Image (cartoon, rainbow, N blue to C red):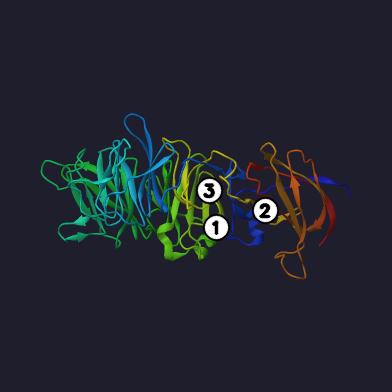
């Protein structure tokens, strides 16, 4: 029979939860990729921002500008509080600080405010200068779990704050200072300082300011706090229960949506409502997550491409985030990966430009600025599901394939094609027949395959550090070659 062109369309989005027939042509595996406008492409690379390395493992980073336009990046690590100004890293650790597993950071006007679990509130005042370190804020609670700034009212919010009534830190107590007065934390008839104790959960895990509302997560539920002026100052409402946050950094905001990881599910806050969101790669994260290091988990927004990536420590990693799952929130497409780049902390686009991430090697990297990963070998690519060229009713002979992809100048990728007669296809009686891998460049017009089967799958791989690729819809020159 005559050969005819058949489009090999690989839909974006990994689905490891479905059976082979349900998954169809969709992706079965991926690494260092993303989805954009219905196509699959390589994840953006990074370039180094710092001339040296920071000390310890970064667990929080925060960029901002001072009043005269100087840019700073605060880096809270397990061993120090440091500052990146230009390409220079300086130590601004408060006196007596020794170690921390977490940091909270925000800016109050041009000043950095921060704390680590159990510490008081600290403030660092620019500009950077020798001996300029973070100092305790006079009048602030003596201990708190975390902090943030309610920008519309210029108030610092402390969660898990010290309670003078109990004489110790209260894990469910929210406290706030007076408006535009960082040193006034005791409520009076003439100020707007105050406290409120939540009534569900055993502790406050994290809080963020979202538009005109504060969102506060306990280990059980989500609460909102809304400014209401005198006499209560803030009104608190439980938004939803049984959707608690698994760890402090496992939440990210993208536009008007917030996504977070709970104990066994993902949840989405949108339009004032909370709902679970289906995760197509759920088994990968929950089967591999090392729950001894939950504090290492961090959810990272990338507004450039509408994605949120949840990085987590896999079993045996010692707390290093060497696995990740990612969702394109606009298109609701998931993917996953493991290995490099291993990022310990992240911040979305900011006054410093493109997103910034810190590596476990002590380097500060700016992402979406390169095709490569600052010397790291990253194998980007995917394996498709089993594509039925004739709905599984006929054997198909594929004589050749015409590649269809966008490649950066001088870039190379490899393609491999696997054929199978039955699914599942890994039985000895019905072995998979592999063709390739074939090296593909911008100048490759076609690949001679001469493969036969009811089903075919495609594996794309790229280890060239300077190659950017985007997959299109290859064309198979094929014909029927027998039926059931």
* Residue reaching furthest to the front: 130
Name the residue rendered at 52%, 57% in the picture: 322
Between 334 and 31, the residue placed more toward the observer is: 31
Is residue 201 at all visible to an observer of this figure?
yes
Residue 427 is situated, as x and y percent measured from the top left of the image, at 73, 69
Residue 273 in picture, x, y percent from top left: 38, 49
On screen, residue 306 versus residue 388, left or right, reads: left
What label does residue 332 carry, if any?
3
Mark 2 crowdedness (10 Å alpha carbons): few <14, some 14-19, many ≥20:
many
- Label 2: which residue? 25
Helix, strand or loop at label 2? It is loop
Distance from the alpha carbon under mark 1 to that under mark 2: 16 Å
Image mark for residue 281: 1
Q: Give percent across and percent down for residue 99.
A: 34, 57
Which residue is more in the foreground, 7 or 155? 155
Left or right side of 63 for 482: right
């Amino acid at each position: 029979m005559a050969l005819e062109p058949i489009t090999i369309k690989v839909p974006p989005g990994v689905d490891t939860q479905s059976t082979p027939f349900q998954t169809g042509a969709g992706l079965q595996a991926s690494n260092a990729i993303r989805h954009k406008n219905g196509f699959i492409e390589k994840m953006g690379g990074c370039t180094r921002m710092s001339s040296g390395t920071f000390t310890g493992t970064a667990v929080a980073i925060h960029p901002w500008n001072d009043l005269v336009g100087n840019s700073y990046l605060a880096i809270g690590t397990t061993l120090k509080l440091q500052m990146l100004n230009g390409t220079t890293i300086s130590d601004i650790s408060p006196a007596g600080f020794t170690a921390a597993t977490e940091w909270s950071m925000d800016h109050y006007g041009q000043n950095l405010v921060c704390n680590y679990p159990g510490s008081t509130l600290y403030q660092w005042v620019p500009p950077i200068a020798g001996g300029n370190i973070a100092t305790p804020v006079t009048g602030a609670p003596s201990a708190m779990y975390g902090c943030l700034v309610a920008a519309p009212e210029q108030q610092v919010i402390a969660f898990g704050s010290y309670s003078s009534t109990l004489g110790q830190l209260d894990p469910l107590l929210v406290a706030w200072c007076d408006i535009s007065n960082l040193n006034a934390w005791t409520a009076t008839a003439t100020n707007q300082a105050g406290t409120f104790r939540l009534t569900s959960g055993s502790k406050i895990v994290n809080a963020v300011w979202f538009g005109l509302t504060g969102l506060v997560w306990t280990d059980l539920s989500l609460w909102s706090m809304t400014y209401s002026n005198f006499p209560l100052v803030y009104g608190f409402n439980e938004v939803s229960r049984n959707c608690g946050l698994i760890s402090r950094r496992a939440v990210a905001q993208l536009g008007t949506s917030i996504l977070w990881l709970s104990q066994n599910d993902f949840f989405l806050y949108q339009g004032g409502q909370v709902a679970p969101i289906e995760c197509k790669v759920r088994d990968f994260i929950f089967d591999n997550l090392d729950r001894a290091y939950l504090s290492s988990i961090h959810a990272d927004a990338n507004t450039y491409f509408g994605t949120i990536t949840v990085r987590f420590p896999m079993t045996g990693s010692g707390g290093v985030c060497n696995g990740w799952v990612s969702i394109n929130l606009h298109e609701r497409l998931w993917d996953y990966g493991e290995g490099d780049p291993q990022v310990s902390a992240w911040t979305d686009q900011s006054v410093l430009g493109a997103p910034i991430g810190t590596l476990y090697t002590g380097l500060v990297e700016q992402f979406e600025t390169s095709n490569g990963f600052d010397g790291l070998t990253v194998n980007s690519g995917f394996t498709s599901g089993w594509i039925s060229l004739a709905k599984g009713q006929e054997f198909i002979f594929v004589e050749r394939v015409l590649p269809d992809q966008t490649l950066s100048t001088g870039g190379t990728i490899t393609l491999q094609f696997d054929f199978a007669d039955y699914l599942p296809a890994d039985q000895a009686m019905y072995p998979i027949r592999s063709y390739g891998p074939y090296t593909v460049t911008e100048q490759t017009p076609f690949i001679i395959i001469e493969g036969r089967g009811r089903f075919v799958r495609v594996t794309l791989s790229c280890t060239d550090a300077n190659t950017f690729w985007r997959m299109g819809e290859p064309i198979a020159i094929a014909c029927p070659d027998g039926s059931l």
